[in-house]
Amino acid sequence: MSETEPPAILTVPAEARSFQGERAGIVSRVLANAIDFAILVVVLGAGYLGWSAWLFLRRGASFRFPTVTYQGTYLVGAIVLTLLFAVAWSTTGRSYGDRILGLRVTNRRGERLGFAGAFVRAVLCVAFPPLLFWAIVNRRSVQDLALRTSVIYDWAEQPRSTPPSDPS
Amino acid sequence: MSEVIRIPIGGGEEEPATPEASSPPSDWFTLAARAAVGLVSLGAEASIQIIRMASGTPEHDQDTATPDPAALLVGAALGLAIEAVRTAATVAELGRRTAGPPASFLIGTVSDAPRRAAVDLVGRWNQSWREERPEVEAAANAVAVEATRRAIDLVLDQLDLTQLVLDHVDIERIVASVDLNEVVEQLDVDAVADRLDIERVIARLDLAKLSLEVIERIDLPEIIRTSTGTVASESVRVVRMQTFGADRAISGLVNRMLGRSATEEAADPDDLDATGE
């Protein structure tokens, strides 16, 4: 499955070229998701601080930091993470965690997902995170099996199979 | 040259006695004399011209009122010669007409035997000439060829042929008419390449400038940027390789637990296929 045509100029280290295009294992995917989760926390914190700053400007002396509930945070976090995933997978094919770990999300033909597919996959991934661990068994999560997607090793900057260029 | 030239002998049997035929010999004689004098005149004039050119003397017009003394003397001598020849021809003609009939009668009656002997002698000479002719001609040819060759050498030594060609030959036209493709096809390029000193050619190249041009052409900075844009720094590469190793280890463990091989794990009906369905 790794026998795809090499790019014109390889920017992938020689020792990693042999497994480019293979499905990624559970460790890579968990680490990528952990990075994405950390980014989500940073984004939520920045959002909280921004919202607080807005309230401070509105209320002045009577300002108090807004209290957030667990449910509210979970809901907002889920929505933000879903949007982050959907946009990332449908544009570059990789979230920031995927980028760090050299992974890419593709459809069954090895191409980048469309926004609809990316959004559905993001919803499923955010709603049922534990289903990722099915990848221990055959390197595909339940979401992947359901949507016939894959997460592959792809260290190169450009996708292995070049989809139509997207200005976004 | 197969016909032998018969020289008419005065008073002989071959001498025509008719008055019409008696005048041509004197005309031929005069004509030949004039031609000879003319040739001598031409040669003398040419010699004078050459001597003048060689000595740098400015050329005078021959028809001017004050001719060159040398030309004057030569012209006078030639004119005298022509007059002498003409007078001699007239005297000879007169003598032949007056003394011809008695002399021929005397020769015909008295000296018949010597005449026959003379005819025989001339016949033998003619025969001898015919036998010797090929060798003589070959020798003459050899001498003529050698003389011509030396003369040409002398002329060529005085000429700058290269300059002459450059001045008068349209070299571009000649080159344009040459089919260079055909020449190149007949050329053994490998043999030429074997004789090339590549090291010297390379030594003449400005490799630094060439490298810069190549880098600019292939946009090496962009390649480096995209390469580093993958966050492929050393630490990230180590992390990626380690996680890949961990993935593989876990896969191997799971495969052993499930009792399947790596190929069975890869055998997925929904396998990645870049060609699609």
Image: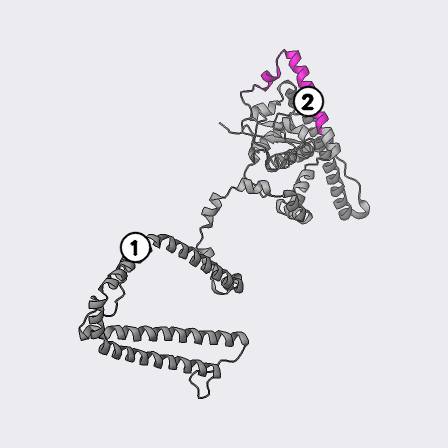
The part of the chain drawn in magenta is B240-269
In terms of depth relative to the viewer, which is nearer, A106 or A158?
Answer: A158
Secondary element type, mark 2? helix
Residue B246 among those drawn in magenta:
yes
Residue B242 among those drawn in magenta:
yes
Q: How is the image coloured?
A: one colour
Secondary element type, mark 1? helix
Q: How many neighbours does mark 2 have within 10 angstroms: few (below 14), some (14-19), or many (20 or more)?
A: many
Of labels 2 and 1, earlier in sequence is 1
| Closer to the eye: label 2 or 1 | 1
Q: How many neighbours does mark 1 have within 10 angstroms: few (below 14), some (14-19), or many (20 or more)?
A: few
Q: Is residue B224 left or right of residue A106?
A: right
Q: Residue at x 72, y 33 (%)?
A: A73
Picture quadrant where residue A126 is located: top right
What mark, if any, has residue A105 been given in the picture?
Answer: none
**Amino acid type of disc 2?**
Asp
**Residue at the outermost front position:** B110
Q: Position of residue A114 (x, y in %)?
A: 56, 35
**Amino acid type of disc 1?**
Gln
Residue located beneath label 2 in the image: B247
Picture quadrant where residue B111 is located: bottom left
Q: Is residue A50 left or right of residue A134?
A: right
Chain ID, mark 2: B
- What secondary structure prevails in the magenta region? helix
Residue located beneath label 1 in the image: B127
